[in-house]
Amino acid sequence: MTADDSPRPRGRPAAGTSFSVSLERGLRILSAFTGNRSVLGIADLARTAGLNKSTTHRYVATLTKLGYLQQDHETRKYFLGPRAADLGFAAIDAMELGKVAGPLLQALADETGCTVSMGLCDGPDVVYVDRRRSARRHAAAMDLNLHVGSRLPAYCTSMGKVLLAFKDAAALRQILDHTDLARRGPKTITNREQLTAALAKVRQSGVAVNDEELAPGLRSFAAPVRDRSGEVVAAVNVAVHLTVAPTAVEALAARIEPPLRRTTAEISRRLGHRP
């Protein structure tokens, strides 16, 4: 039996239709790099990952080509590449974002009496990663059967429009090329040119308004969250229904936008953003 065929370490799931052995081997190689073992040769990697040298070399070559590993041409040893670093920073930022934002989102919900959500962009969708309801009595709670993990089309939601608005032109064009601008509410923007113009206004004002574009009676306001580099990494919205706030959208904006902007600015500041 070769090292490549060695038994799985305890806790590793058995291979099956929903388990990729190739992916698992690649991750075992990446996991071999630690703080005190940041530069490793093929023999070291093979021993640590429990694979034979030829198999290890094949996986290392692939990981190097994809940018997850880099090779020192003098020593012929390997170290983590920029793609691996990107994943690490993304994981740190995601954990930091949730830890930082949670109390501030709850405070915003309590201050406004409305439901507050935070979302991230995943292609043409916005994915809900936090959702808070006000602790105040008679709060204007919005449900819509949404929860953490819910997805909605970005083009017809306030958070989605914020996240789209700050994409670079090429990325935005690619997303819109794969988006069906179907009518979801009475005021859904279904024309691409009109949507592009609306996103330009969001970039200029820093706030997106959803006035019955997703569903009848639903209004929401969203603003961007930026990381230390200034990149927009998330959006926060405040949602309210006409049945509990039957006022003009301008009057509602005057009440909602100041605490919304203040909250997203504070989340961004705690993430290291300096305007």
Image (cartoon, rainbow, N blue to C red):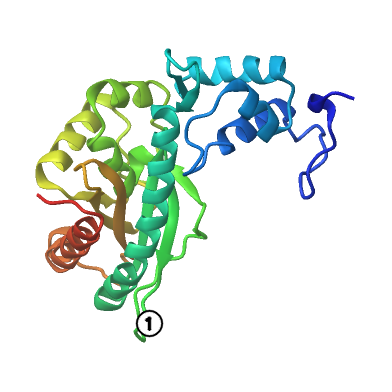
Outermost residue, right direction? 1
Q: Residue at x 80, y 27 (%)?
A: 3
Outermost bottom residue: 137
Q: Let me know if residue 108 appears in the view.
A: yes
Q: How many labels does the image show?
A: 1
**Secondary structure found at label 1:** loop
The picture places residue 146, in percent across and down from the top left corner, at 49, 58
- Which residue is drawn at the image coordinates 35% and 21% (left, top)? 174
Seen in the picture, residue 205 relative to 77 is either above or below; the reply is: below
Place of residue 189 in the rendered image (x, y in percent of width and height, measured from the top left): 29, 36
Mark 1 residue crowding within 10 angstroms, few (<14) / some (14–19) / many (20+): some
Q: In this view, does 138 lie to the left or right of 209?
A: right
Residue at the disc numbered 1: 135
Q: Where is residue 270 in the image (x, y as percent from the top left)?
A: 23, 60
Residue 126 visible: no
Three-letter amino acid code at disc 1?
Ala
